[in-house]
Image (cartoon, grey):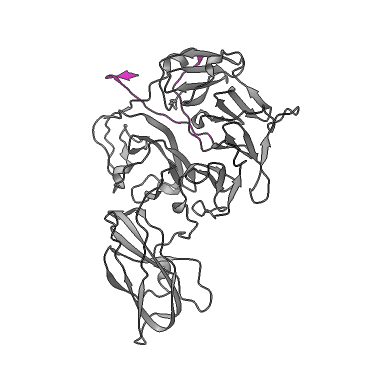
Amino acid sequence: MRRGGGYYYRKFSRWDLGIIISGLLAGRAEAQTALLDAENIRISDGTIKPRAGQKYLDGDIYVDEVINGLYQYSRQYIGVGGMVDFYKAYIFAAEDKLYLWDGVGDDTIWDITDGINYSMESDDIYCCTYQDWCYITTGKETIKTDGTAGNTRLLNQIGGLNNPSGALSFAQIDDGVGNLSGKRSYKYRYVKKNGDIVIDYSEFFTVQEVNGLVNDNVNVTHPASGDPDVTHIEIWCTKTYTTTAPSEWYRIIVVVDANNTHKDNVSDLVIEGYYTEYTGDDYIGYLNGINKLSFYKDRLYGIEEGLDPSLYRYSDIGNPEKWNADSWIDVKRDDGDIIVMGVTLGQSHYIFKQRSIWVLTGDPDAIPLIEVRAGGDASPNQTEYGLGCTSPRSIAVVGDTCYFYSKVHGVWSISNEGIKCISTNVSEDIRGLDNCSACVYVDDNGRLYYILSDSVTGIAWVCDTETKTCLKDTNIKSTCLIIYSDG
């Protein structure tokens, strides 16, 4: 599969309960020789035409930087003849670019970052799919996409746009023929747009209220930002009300960044036709460095690495973009350890720190977190003292089993049969690896092999999960592994 000095990749996919960890192999004997160097990727040009609004790279593509993370995204849609179909795409990052390949036709890929006019702060991406959206995080930025240019946007970045500092001013147009009566609340923010796509935005200024409207309209005057990265100003409002302001907000005015005045004559009868989304103070876009999202029981979970890496944050039920300030789990704070990753396994959600494992078995507002401890009970809630996961990309979920790596304790698994060490019959040099990625391969006989590669040392292991023996290889510097969808 090696061509022209680079490595040629085709048909790659692995979807394990929100975690994509992939590897190229075709059986135990072939696995050692089939692991490929992921520092280069070659996608050949195809004949597919880009969808409206998307920009594709032309010609053969060589990514010379290390690829950190490869994920499959899919969503359901109504296709030709009203039949349910599935859209699938593969997302990966290299250097300051984020790419999407939908596998249609030949191997044409879309540069997502070019489409939204943005350069990534980090290429160490993690992805999670929820409610038809793929949320891509690095701890420095969050990007949301459904695989189309029009619905791809930058939700947040550390060190983004300047926030508004001046209030709106209002003048009621009291001519008796206006559309507004009662009260209306307003707020505004600055945004950066690329074409019609909002790619960054500030926080909202304090909500302001206009009272005493009687068949009036309102002139709204807004201040310019002074930030050269800001391109537009958005003004949002509620429907009119008499006592309590409605919770829904609508974006009624989008104008070029400047000091100016614009009329609000949007009646309640037509306001629902304007754009709306959740934009409260607990919006995901305001989280400081949220990363490594995972899905469990109709919520998203993640680590707010920029604030406290021992707090496990979670969204509202059914609303992946609303994260209340007090919606977090204390995973033994101040123990000198950090959360590495969260993984859904069956009806449980495991939270891995470097030296401990915790399990959530229901809604976090009602069910307490349980530490996975040492003890005589051979259950998935029992393990060795000090055992955790030191490499988030070493986690691989297959069926009812989760495999993971600790540089202190080696390769382990969690399942309904309990905690098991997979690297029992292995020399000590499987320990101490700091930059691991992994996958699980199942051969035609149903036998499972855990594949572990360290990108810095070049050491790779192919572990037989049944015999607990591992074969060692060297000079395999893979940061992410790829598995052929056809085996």
Instruction: Please name whichever residue, 343 or 385, is drawn nearer the observer in this view of the structure.
Output: 385
Query: Which residue is farthest bottom?
Result: 176
- Residue 342 visible in the current orientation: yes
Taking the magenta stretch, the answer to whether it contains residue 13 is yes
Q: Is the magenta stretch mostly helix, strand or loop?
A: loop
- From the viewer's perspective, is residue 59 above or below residue 28? below
Number of numbered tags placed on the structure image: 0
**Start and end of the magenta stretch?**
1-28
Is 63 left, or right, of 281 in this rendering?
left
* Residue 427: x %, y % from top left: 56, 12
Residue 126: where, in percent of width, then height? 45, 38
Which residue of the protein is positioned furthest toward the right in this rendering?
376
Q: In this view, does 420 lie to the left or right of 44?
A: right
Quadrant where the N terminus is found in the figure:
top left
Task: Using the rendered image of the protein, determine whether residue 84 is visible from the camera's viewpoint.
Answer: no
472 above or below 217?
A: above
Give the percent coordinates (x, y) of residue 133: 45, 47
Residue drawn at the location 53% of the way across and 17% of the way down: 430
User: Horizontal placement of 244 versus 3: left or right?
Assistant: right
Q: Is residue 256 left or right of residue 372?
A: left
Q: Does the magenta run of residues contain 192?
A: no
> As displayed, is residue 153 above or below residue 261?
above
Residue 111 quadrant: top left
Residue 124 location, x and y as percent? 41, 35
| Vertical order, 220 against 199 (above or below) | below
Q: Residue furthest left?
A: 59
